[in-house]
Image (spheres, helix red, strand yellow):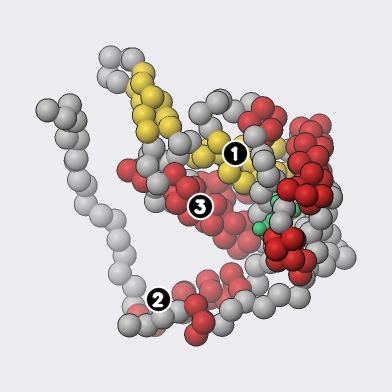
Amino acid sequence: MTGVTTTYRPVPLVFERLPEPEMIARARAYADAMARRRTVRDFSPDPVPLELLDHAIRAAASAPSGAHQQPWTFVVVSDPERKRRIREAAEEEERVSYAGRMSDEWLAALAPLGTDWHKPHLTDAPHLIVVFAQPTGVAAAPDGTTRKVKHYYVDESVGIAVGMLLSCLHLAGLATLTHTPSPMGFLREVCERPAHERPYVVIPVGYPRADAQVPDLQRKPLDEVRVRL
Ligand code: IYR
């Protein structure tokens, strides 16, 4: 006796089959546009409408997830004081990391990116999207009682959602930075999230500064990343 009740109730799939040339044109246009995405560290304080971020979060929250449990929360931080607190705590952690917690091998791997413990983007960008993962959730029974439930494939699910978020923001004409302060437990308190949520990534969002610079990086060519069998 498993105690599991079956609730599978399928509905017809809504799907439009396109002509092949149109499919290829769409795929090429998307890949070409994504190839122009860069991780940006020099942000302008110019305002960005919250409505745009809502659409990007809708796109992210459409991601596939383990058992369709949607184990994510996207916190939009626009308040300067809260951004300042996040910057202060992140820089404190990063200062310690760069001064000794990170191995020489790690520091050498980061050298071409020009990063250090200074994180001005955390206050320069008009918004930070702080993404939280939910390793567990709260399920409500029909009788109104709640219980803690385990979520499955949480990192995979949230990673896919963040990829879709970055993609949408880029296609909408904005710059982002994928920032993982380490450790980042402080984000739970600053963002007022409950104990069962785990900070996953901080994404400053905005326009690049007019004089923004990026490292001179090349992406691996297709032949190096794609294998055909
Ligand atoms: N979290 C640090 C270090 C860092 C680590 C990796 I891996 C990067 O690709 C970039 C930075 C920081 O934010 O500086």
Callout 1 amino acid? Pro
Callout 3 amino acid? Gly
The quarter of the image that holds ligand 1 is: bottom right
Label annotation for residue 159? 3
Callout 2 amino acid? Met
Q: Nearer the viewer, residue 140 or 44?
A: 140
Q: Position of residue 110 (x, y in %)?
A: 73, 63
Label annotation for residue 144? none
Residue 40 visible in the current orientation: no
* Residue lying at the far right of the rendered structure: 211
The quadrant of the picture occupied by the N terminus is: top left
Would you say the residues marked 1 and 2 are in contact, meaning their CB atoms lie under 8 Å apart? no
Label 1 vs label 3: CA separation? 12 Å
Q: Nearer the viewer, mark 2 or mark 3?
A: 3
Label annotation for residue 199? 1
Q: Residue at x 55, y 36 (%)?
A: 198
Q: Residues within 10 Å of mark 2 (few under 14, many from 20)?
A: few
Label 2 vs label 3: CA separation? 26 Å
Q: Quadrant of residue 188?
A: top right
Q: Secondary structure at mark 1?
A: strand
Label annotation for residue 23? 2
In the picture shown, does residue 160 fall above or below 222?
above
Q: Residues within 10 Å of mark 1 (few under 14, many from 20)?
A: many
Q: Position of residue 222 (x, y in %)?
A: 51, 82
